[in-house]
């Protein structure tokens, strides 16, 4: 009888945990929609309590960094993205686009060496990316190499981006080639 009660209690706890995870995912989905609609304060108002409850929630940390970046707080976004990545203790991120995002922000600050590192990490995990994210990564890599004056590498990645379906890659190639 005690075993049944313990099993029932464990099942109820598992169900409650799943419900909380589902509601957290739904809340973060909503925050992402708000962010994309440029309602940044509202998005942050959803993210903050989730992080207060679960400070190591990777997705919430990543979403907070995206809000920071959209607010123009690039330095804060870089710190927050690094916090999210470090919280994984060397494991591959559940959303590998974080590496591209970090590379993009680093490139914006002129830190090309670190940007190249994170773009390379993203590129090595490109199989886990959906096509639009892959196109952005390849375009970002092409842009980085163009900024560094490495036309050969820039052309390579812009061509890969164009092959992946990126409309902006062709424009970037035209600018690069002249």
Image (cartoon, rainbow, N blue to C red):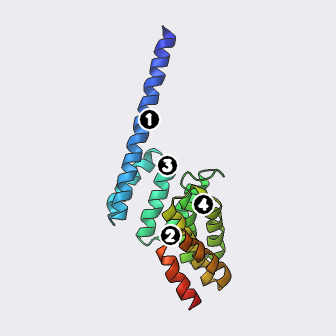
Frontmost of labels 1 and 3 is 1
How far is disc 3 from disc 2 in space, using C-alphas? 37 Å
Frontmost of labels 4 and 2 is 2
The answer to whether residue 106 shows anywhere in this view is no
How crowded is the residue under tag 1: few (<14 C-alpha within 10 Å), some, or many (20+)?
few
Q: Which residue is mark 3?
A: 55
Q: Which residue is mark 1?
A: 18
The answer to whether residue 166 shows anywhere in this view is yes
**Residue drawn where x is 43% and y is 73% of the image:** 72
**Residue drawn where x is 46% and y is 53% of the image:** 60
* Label 2: which secondary element: loop
Q: Which residue is mark 2?
A: 165
How crowded is the residue under tag 2: few (<14 C-alpha within 10 Å), some, or many (20+)?
some
Frontmost of labels 2 and 1 is 2
In the picture, measured across the screen, residue 35 lies left or right of residue 74, that is left
Pick the quarter of the image with the C terminus: bottom right
Sequence-wise, the earlier of marks 3 and 2 is: 3
Residue 91 x, y percent position in the rendering: 64, 50
* Label 3: which secondary element: loop
Return the residue nearer the eye: 82 or 175: 175
Frontmost of labels 3 and 2 is 2
Sequence-wise, the earlier of marks 2 and 1 is: 1
Query: Can you tell which mark lies on residue 2?
Result: none
Q: Which residue is mark 4?
A: 126
Sequence-wise, the earlier of marks 4 and 2 is: 4
């Amino acid at each position: 009888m005690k075993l049944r009660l313990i099993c029932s209690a464990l099942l109820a706890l598992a169900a409650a945990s799943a419900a909380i995870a589902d509601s957290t995912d739904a809340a973060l989905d909503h925050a992402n929609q708000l962010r994309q609609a440029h309602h940044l304060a509202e998005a942050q108002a959803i993210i903050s309590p989730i992080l207060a409850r679960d400070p190591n929630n990777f997705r919430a940390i990543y979403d907070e960094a995206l809000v920071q970046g959209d607010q123009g707080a690039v330095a804060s976004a870089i710190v927050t993205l690094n916090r999210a990545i470090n919280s994984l203790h060397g494991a591959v991120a559940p959303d590998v686009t974080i590496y591209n995002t970090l590379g993009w922000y680093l490139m914006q600050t002129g830190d090309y060496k670190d940007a190249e590192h994170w773009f390379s990490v993203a590129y090595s995990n490109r199989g886990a990316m959906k096509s639009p994210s892959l196109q952005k990564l390849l375009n970002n890599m092409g842009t980085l190499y163009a900024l560094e004056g490495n036309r050969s590498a820039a052309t390579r990645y812009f061509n890969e981006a164009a092959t992946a379906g990126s409309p902006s890659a062709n424009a970037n190639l035209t600018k690069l080639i002249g």
